[in-house]
Image (cartoon, rainbow, N blue to C red):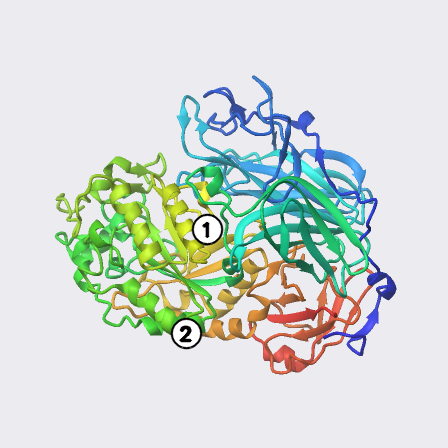
Amino acid sequence: MGHPKACCLALALNVAGAFANPIKPRGLISKSAPIDLVSHFNNKAFGTYAGEAAFDPLNQSYPAPAIAHDGSYTSTQSGIQYGFPGYTGPNKSDNVLCTGQTIEVPKKSYFSASLLVASDVELETVSGNLTFTYRDDTTSVSELRSEPWWAFLTINRGEIIFPYRYTANGTNFNTTHIYEYSYALDNTKSLASITLPTTTNTTTGRLHVFAISLWEGSGVSVQSVRPTQKWVGNGTQVVEVTINNAGTQCVSGAGLKVTLSGGNITTVSPGYVKRLCLGDQKRVNIGTRGTSKGSVSVTLDDGSLQQNQTFNNLDLGLSTWTSELDNLAQHEAPDWFDGAKFGIFIHWGPYAVPGWGNSTPHESYAEWFWWYTTHHPEADASDFYDYRLRTFGPDWNYDDSFVNYTASKFDPRAWVDLFAHAGAKYFVFTTKHHDGFANFDTGATSNRSSIHYGPKRDILGELFDAAAEYQPSLRRGTYFSLPEWFNPDFGPYGFSQLATNSSTTWPGMLATNPYTGLAEPYTGHIPVDDFITDVMVPQMEILAYNYSTDIMWCDCGAANGTADFAASWWNTARSQNRQVTMNSRCGLAHTADFDTPEYTTFSTAQARKWESNQGMDPYSYGYNRATNASAYMNASTIIKDLVDMVSKNGNFLLDVGPKADGSFVQEEVDNLKEAGKWINSHGEAIFNTTYWFVMPEDRSGRLRFTQTEGAFYVFSFEKPKDGLLVVDAVLPILPGDDVTAVGVGNASAALKWEKSDEGTLKIEVPQSISDSEKYCWVYKIEYFT
């Protein structure tokens, strides 16, 4: 552990001040300061009937909110209070369409800025620079970013969820959303104004701001108390407490003990904050027993002083899951998922037989081979139609691929060993894609499966059994497509995703051979009365109960039975002391534990948990024989993407597409193993870490940051220049802290460092350490006791 010694070349910090007591028992001022935006309102988002408001370019709108009738809204996640307009009456604007407006604020110091925001074009994520100007004319810039206000397959979840939207002349019952965004301010300066981005393109989407709130802070204080439905041990509820340091001294040394009391609440597991420096925020978990409806008191105790804050209107206690949406919305990703960080995705099925997606720049998802060839010329830029004809001839049907989907080289132990060697902590296997072919025992719901055709094996069962026996630390997940393209029983629920000729569709009728005009078979189909109650939900239950999946990773959720399924599964899992999770594509925004962007990362940290999924193939999840060996994601990219995502509160779900015989492309195997060497040797800086509230990356873009309770990690994508790493960010480092290199042979040796008056950190890096790394250099700041 650290102590004053030769590791520090020069110390600009006042040692006595750094360790002085940072909490004050009286005179605490910490509160939300909503900014009045009424004079800037220039758009009407909320209406009481179709056509009253025109939030987006299509004259659509949100319904009038059932919340904030008093003009105030408090975030369920952050505890920030907003001046939220809601429905303001006929012909009255209620939000700010961002056109570069500068908004004056009361000139004082603030800890953070939070906004309620949404973009207004389906499928378009919109971002722009948000500029904060201080009284000394310095500025800070952050990316204000928002998902679209609605998405057809309900794959987004906002802070505020509406059950429907008004179209120009009717009502559409897809959920709509408003999102929350927060940014850490420089609270050593007085803020003067906020300048919104300019987003006026009606095709690519515009940003709308509904509310802005600034957090006023003094010293170390609690921003919010959030009861969760997570638990530890046998029924100990996890309560999340958000703590800010808006003072002048760091929390250090013995740190802070955080407890909760009130009603019949007992703190079983206190929370601890070992290090919290100026302008920083941490979310701490407390374990409690008992129930309480009303007020609770949070105590911060540093061993000599105590600070108490009271929070009202809290409902504590673990509850039974029901199918009510407000109840389901309390579920969230468990801590093990947050800490797992890196997973392997596997797309494997009969589509691996044709194995075609073309090559960049005209590459498409190979697992969509059947849909593209049935025939969709407007969407077929990747030559699926002609490839099928010249390869298989006109009389070939998709189900003819079953016989060549052999799994003859499928070795489940080799698979799970590869995932572990790659550094992954979980995997998600495609149990059934949109073609309706299942890689598991579907019981009486269908015979269209690997049990009856192709391999004639329970692929999922073998894979899960191998993981349990040979890699028991790997969590096991199941991808499951809710709809099936051409299952005739899906007909009543069939849909087009977009109102365009090139839209992807799930028609719910037999496919037509594009060359003969004849109906293609749907081999193994068992007719049922209702697809949702007789196929979809029973198959989800099989995965949940027969195979004990940890992750229900749905796709393309439109019509669904998710509410009843989720309530039952979560109750059963809790009775078994298992914490399970669902992604954002099960058809209900309220059951979305984490967001699932594809081939995407962000430039800012996201407070809400997310997981980016992408293939090692440049643009396909299923095996694509047209991909050149050099095009597969290499170890360097895997590592950099993982580090980047983890620093922003994300997980990385990296996909591989096996061939029809169950073997992997060798380049995928080699690159996974190479990346795994680095990931496994640097795991302490990745797994079970959290992001840094102040910033996820430095201004140069070459550094990333993560932290644990006892340490802070700096990732550098560049080799140290002249034996020196320079970090132009005010890191939470204090006199006596040890700085070491992670993942190298002599990592235990303390490195010399110094910190300037402006906060710039310089670390001396010996040549041996500089030369020992190839992909990313990692430095650990270990906090002294």
Question: What amino acid does circle 2 point to?
Answer: Asp
Q: In this view, does 384 lie to the left or right of 281?
A: left
Label 1: how many residues lie within 10 Å, few (<14), some (14-19) or many (20+)?
Answer: many
Quadrant of the rendered image containing residue 110 = top right
Task: Estimate the x, y position of residue 488 in percent, counting from the top left.
Answer: 20, 41
Q: Considering depth in this image, is 565 or 766 the residue closer to the camera? A: 565
- The quadrant of the picture occupied by the N terminus is bottom right
Given the current orientation, which residue lies at the most extreme top position? Answer: 90
Q: Earlier in the sequence, mark 2 or mark 1?
A: 1
- For residue 670, which numbered disc appears in the image? 2
Q: Which residue is drawn at 55% across and 65% down?
A: 687
> How many marks on residues?
2
Between the residue at mark 2 and the residue at mark 1, the CA separation in whole angstroms equals 27 Å
Q: Considering depth in this image, is 449 or 741 the residue closer to the camera? A: 449
Task: Estimate the x, y position of residue 74 in percent, counting from the top left.
Answer: 63, 37
Label 2: how many residues lie within 10 Å, few (<14), some (14-19) or many (20+)?
Answer: some
Question: What amino acid does circle 1 point to?
Answer: Thr
Q: Which secondary structure lies at badge 2?
A: helix
Q: In this view, does 266 lie to the left or right of 754?
A: left
Whether residue 729 is visible: no
Q: Considering depth in this image, is 71 or 6 the residue closer to the camera? A: 71
Task: Estimate the x, y position of residue 701 in percent, counting from the top left.
Answer: 63, 59
Q: Which residue is drawn at 50% across and 19% down?
A: 52
Task: Estimate the x, y position of residue 625 in percent, counting from the top left.
Answer: 30, 63
Q: Which secondary structure lies at badge 1?
A: loop
Whether residue 146 is visible: yes
Q: Name the residue under label 1.
A: 596
Q: Residue at x 60, y 51 (%)?
A: 239
Q: Which of marks 2 and 1 is in front?
A: 1
Q: Which residue is drawn at 35% across and 39% down?
A: 497
